[in-house]
Image (spheres, rainbow, N blue to C red):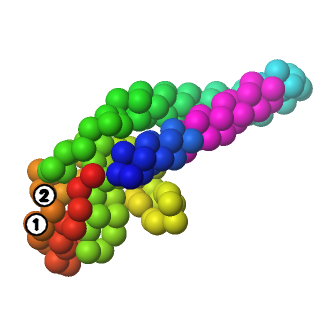
């Protein structure tokens, strides 16, 4: 049951990353098409400014694309068959306030009818959870939380 849940969470993270990569790639393709359509007119400065803006947008998208490719690598490194007693990278953590998946910053995921927050290992909540085991309590953002289960 817990390994199945983790596999589903990993799949949800993969789907999140792939969707983002597709969206960014479509935006890059649209920009490339816009650059090809851009024709030089009598107003030279306007033409150059337009091309410069398109290039800046292209560079921004290229950086985002590379970041999501790194996230895809990170998702592929998540140990799907390993269940730790203490919170580590790849752990599913149920607390008294929310459920967390220590993996990548993918936000809210709904798996098996439950809400999980996929967070990166460097996120503040993940840092507070690292090394904790079921039954541990800790304070985060002024609230007392209890680790109920680690998968």
Tell me: residue 117, above or below residue 32. below
| Depicted 83 relative to depicted 125: above or below | above
In the shown orientation, is residue 66 left or right of residue 145?
right
Q: Which residue is mark 2?
A: 133
Whether residue 80 is in magenta: the answer is: no
The residue to which callout 1 is attached is 136
Q: Nearer the viewer, residue 60 or 85?
A: 85
Instruction: Kindly tell me whether residue 127 is visible in this rendering.
Output: no
Locate residue 61, reporting x and y percent: 58, 33
In the structure shown, which secondary structural element does the residue marked by tag 1 occupy? loop
Distance from the alpha carbon under mark 2 to that under mark 1: 6 Å
Check disc 1: other Cα within 10 Å, few if <14, some if 14-19, many if 20+.
some
Q: Position of residue 138 (x, y in %)?
A: 12, 69
Q: Going by the image, does 100 lie left or right of 126?
A: right
Q: Does the magenta-highlighted stretch encompass residue 26? A: yes
Q: What residue is shown at x 24% (from left), y 44% (from top)?
A: 83
Q: Which residues are magenta?
A: 16-34
Q: Number of marks in the image? A: 2
Q: Which mark is residue 124?
A: none
Q: Do callouts 2 and 1 mark residues in contact (Cβ within 8 Å)?
A: yes
User: Residue 54 location in percent, x, y?
Assistant: 68, 32
Q: Is residue 80 visible?
A: yes
Q: Residue at x 45, y 56 (%)?
A: 107
> Among all residues in the image, which is located at the extreme front?
1
Residue nearest the observer in this picture, 104 or 53? 104
Q: Residue at x 74, y 28 (%)?
A: 29
């Amino acid at each position: 049951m817990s390994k199945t849940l983790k596999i589903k969470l990993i799949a949800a993270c993969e789907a999140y990353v792939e969707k983002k990569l597709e969206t960014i790639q479509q935006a890059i393709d649209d920009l490339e098409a816009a650059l090809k359509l851009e024709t030089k007119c009598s107003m030279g400065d306007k033409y150059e400014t337009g091309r410069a803006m398109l290039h800046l947008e292209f560079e921004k998208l290229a950086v985002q694309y590379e970041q999501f490719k790194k996230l895809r690598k990170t998702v592929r490194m998540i140990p799907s068959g390993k269940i730790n007693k203490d919170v580590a990278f790849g752990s599913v953590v149920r607390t008294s306030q929310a459920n967390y998946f220590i993996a990548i910053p993918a936000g809210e995921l709904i798996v098996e009818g439950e809400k999980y927050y996929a967070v990166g290992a460097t996120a503040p909540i993940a840092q507070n959870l690292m090394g904790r085991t079921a039954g541990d309590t800790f304070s985060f953002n002024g609230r007392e939380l209890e680790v109920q289960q680690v998968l």
